[in-house]
Image: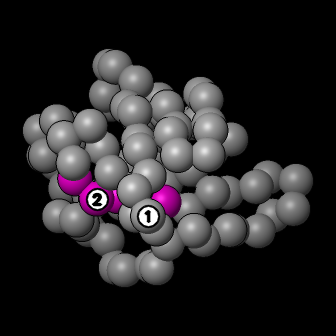
Amino acid sequence: MYLLLRYPAGILVEAVVLARGRNRMRVAASGIPDAIELRRSGQQWFTEARQPVEFDFLMSDARAVQRISPARPAKVSGAAAAAIH
């Protein structure tokens, strides 16, 4: 499943879900060599470094977007990999 990760600094990263559970998710993100593990605490998802993230799932068969967190404007940054880790 394809998704877009949104980091607090406005960084937007394309990713693919490798594994998903109720409170954990592992994703392979574009431009990042290692998989990212996300964990949910309450309604918010966090990276291993405790950075909050939001994401949108894109479903190709339904051609619809399912939002699981509030949308905020995102800016693309050249320092994405540095800010993520």
Q: Name the residue beneath numbered marker 2.
A: 52
- Which picture quadrant has residue 5? bottom left
Which residue lies most toward the top here? 33
Residue beneath disc 1: 42
Q: Is residue 54 magenta?
A: yes
As rendered, which of 21 and 12 lies closer to the eye? Answer: 21
Q: Amino acid at mark 1?
A: Gly
Q: Position of residue 56 (x, y in %)?
A: 56, 62
Closer to the chain start, of discs 2 and 1, is: 1
Main SS of residues in magenta: strand
What type is the residue that disc 2 sits on?
Pro
Q: Which stretch did the figure color magenta?
A: 51-55
Viewer can see residue 12: no
Q: Where's the N terminus, which quadrant?
A: top right
At mark 2, the secondary structure is: strand
Question: Please, which residue is most extreme toward the right here?
Answer: 61
Which callout, 2 or 1, points to the residue nearer the camera? Answer: 1
Residue 83 within the magenta-colored segment of the rendering: no
Q: Residue at x 76, y 68 (%)?
A: 64
Label count reads 2
Residue under the image location 56 percent in, 50 percent down: 3
Q: Would residue 36 be found to the left or right of residue 57 on screen? A: left
Mark 1 Cα-neighbour bin, 10 Å: few <14, some 14–19, many ≥20: few
